[in-house]
């Protein structure tokens, strides 16, 4: 190709990238806002469920049994399905971009049926052998706790095919630039979960937690499965079709290495089965808080970035992927670091307001507050950054690097957690999780820098500024909470978080104005203007 031709091609790629970000085609912050809006509902609904759960059952035998049983279908879903959306979505987007919509939907239909059948068979098998599975996963449980966990696992296993279909169809809807409805699905499920819990706990006791989750799974799956089925497909692709085989091959390392990667949750239950009643639940409550903040602030970025990264890579190749990845990293860390700092600063009053009532006492609040910052560092910061980096590898059809590194980190977790739990109990388990989640993030960053030419120094300069602004915001939140002594506790927490957030945005603006605008856009407070093009120096 001549120099002029290359220049025209590059110019076209830049214009397409600008169109993806700035046109009516759902630019990243605007799409992220839709997800954040849905996740705000999810946050309120999820917090309501946790408050009800804490008031009814507190932190003890029943909640420990539920968390032990829940780990089994969660493990199976993570192993078998975590790679499916990441491999199917790029294939779906590419087929649609090539004008082959029928083929795209035939591919979706094939995996909808395959997912439903395989997971239903596993669900039946898991329910039949629930007692043996609990004995294997948590052998040191007391007999009473083991019986409760077994009863709950029988119910929870049937959520497995529903969770699988929900994950798959949510990815398809996101690929169609439909972000709000999938984001609302989890919140709708949480409302149903809470209502089921309130209706059943007096009559069935602790298994009401499992029934609530099953009902929640039905509704979550329905929200995204119904529109996908309504669109339909003319026929299914045979399993021998090259496109089906390509996705299976890309998924293979994710599934194979995923057995070790996601075994972390099972080993966590194994080690925790020997801890006093309630300590696994403390870790569970901290994880729930972290997950809710990720859902509110982080999921929108990841959900909006992945289809964008795929489209831009198709148009601009490696330079486009580098640009979007750097942008995603900046936006992710600009959100994750202040969320960690501010939440840690107000952890004790926040937990007091949310959970300290009924069966959940002050001692429980203190225990959860001890572990919350550590859990958030791994579940919020490391998970968000690692997820974005993994998406970049999936776009270039490299599923081995992510899987191998994550498997190595999980292999390290097994002995490390065994040592740390002996020294610090449930807090030691949290530290083991954090240390092992940091390793693949560091390694993936180095690999991506070497393979794609990621400008890491440019990103790190911004990250140092985000970290300093986050510390200032955390201090502001802590001082605000302490200075509002006469107000009710809930208003003090709201005031502290508001003050911390305001201080952070004000400090962020001179450091990275575009990240500040994008952050406000994600929260619905401001629309990003066309000045976002300045990020890459495009004229």
Image (spheres, helix red, strand yellow):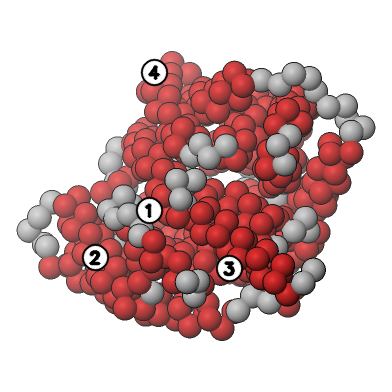
Q: Which marked residue is nearer to the observer: mark 1 or mark 3? A: 3
Label 4–label 1 contact, CB within 8 A: no
Task: Return the mark for residue 458.
Answer: none
Residue 494 visible to an observer of this rendering: yes
In which quadrant of the rendered image does the N terminus lie?
Answer: bottom right
Please report whichever mark, 4 or 1, sits nearer to the chain's N-terminal start. Answer: 4
**Which of the two discs, 2 and 4, labels the residue nearer the N terminus?**
4
**Picture residue at 51% right of the left edge, 59% below the top:** 18
Residue 511 left/right relative to 175: left
User: Furthest residue to the left?
Assistant: 486
According to the picture, the residue beneath numbered tag 4 turns out to be 199
Mark 1 / mark 3, whichever is N-terminal: 3
The residue that disc 3 covers is 323
Residue labelled with disc 1? 522
User: In this view of the protein, which residue sits in the foreground, 26 or 263?
Assistant: 26
Taking depth in this image into account, of 364 and 334 the one nearest to the observer is 334
The residues bearing labels 2 and 4 have C-alpha atoms spaced at a distance of 41 Å
CA–CA distance in space, label 4 to label 1: 36 Å
Give the residue drawn at x 60%, y 40%. Answer: 175
Q: Are marks 1 and 3 in contact (CB under 8 Å)?
A: no
Coordinates of residue 185 in the picture (x, y in percent)? 48, 32
Question: The residue tagged with tag 4: helix, strand or loop?
Answer: helix
């Amino acid at each position: 190709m001549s120099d002029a031709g290359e220049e025209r091609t590059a110019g076209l790629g830049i214009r397409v990238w600008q169109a993806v970000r700035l046109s009516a085609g759902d630019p990243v912050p605007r799409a992220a806002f839709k997800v954040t809006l849905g996740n705000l509902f999810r946050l309120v609904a999820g917090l309501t469920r946790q408050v009800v759960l804490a008031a009814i059952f507190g932190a003890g035998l029943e909640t420990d049994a539920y968390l032990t049983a829940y780990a089994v279908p969660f493990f199976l879903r993570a192993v078998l399905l975590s790679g499916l959306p990441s491999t199917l979505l790029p294939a779906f987007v590419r087929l649609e971009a090539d004008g082959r919509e029928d083929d795209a939907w035939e591919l979706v239909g094939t995996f909808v049926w395959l997912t439903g059948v395989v997971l239903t068979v596993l669900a039946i098998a898991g329910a039949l052998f629930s007692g043996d599975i609990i004995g294997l996963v948590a052998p040191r449980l007391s007999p009473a706790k083991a019986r409760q966990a077994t009863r709950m696992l029988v119910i929870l296993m049937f959520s497995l095919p529903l969770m699988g279909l929900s994950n798959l169809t949510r990815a398809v809807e996101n690929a169609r630039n439909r972000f709000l409805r999938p984001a609302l699905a989890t919140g709708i499920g949480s409302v149903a979960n809470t209502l089921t819990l309130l209706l059943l706990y007096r009559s069935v006791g602790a298994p009401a937690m499992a029934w609530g989750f099953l009902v929640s799974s039905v509704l979550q799956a329905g929200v995204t499965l119904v529109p996908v089925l309504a669109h339909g497909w003319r026929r299914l692709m045979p399993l021998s079709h090259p496109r089906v085989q390509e996705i299976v091959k890309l998924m293979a390392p994710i599934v194979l290495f995923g057995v070790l990667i996601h075994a972390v949750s099972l080993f966590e239950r194994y080690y925790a089965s020997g801890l006093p009643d309630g300590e696994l639940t403390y870790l569970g409550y901290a994880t729930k808080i972290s997950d809710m903040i990720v859902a509110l602030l982080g999921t929108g970025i990841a959900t909006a970035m992945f289809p964008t990264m795929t489209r831009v890579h198709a148009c601009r190749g490696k330079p486009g992927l580098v640009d979007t990845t750097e942008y995603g990293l900046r936006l992710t860390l600009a959100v994750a670091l202040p969320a960690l700092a501010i939440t840690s600063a107000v952890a004790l009053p926040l937990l007091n307001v949310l959970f300290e009532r009924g069966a959940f006492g002050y001692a429980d609040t203190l225990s959860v507050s001890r572990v919350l910052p550590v859990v958030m560092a791994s579940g919020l910061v490391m998970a968000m950054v690692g997820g974005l980096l993994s998406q970049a590898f999936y776009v270039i059809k490299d599923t081995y690097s992510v899987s191998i590194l994550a498997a190595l980190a999980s292999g390290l977790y097994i002995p490390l957690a065994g040592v740390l739990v002996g020294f610090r109990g449930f807090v030691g388990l949290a530290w083991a999780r954090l240390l092992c989640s940091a390793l693949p993030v560091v390694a993936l960053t180095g690999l991506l820098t070497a393979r794609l030419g990621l400008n890491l120094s440019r990103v790190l300069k911004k990250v140092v500024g985000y970290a300093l602004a986050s510390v200032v915001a955390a201090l502001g939140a802590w001082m605000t909470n302490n200075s509002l002594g006469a107000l009710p506790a809930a208003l003090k927490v709201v005031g502290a978080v508001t003050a911390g957030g305001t201080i952070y945005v004000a400090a962020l603006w001179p450091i990275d104005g575009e990240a500040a605008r994008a952050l406000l856009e994600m929260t619905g407070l401001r629309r990003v203007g066309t000045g976002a093009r300045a990020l890459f120096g495009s004229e």
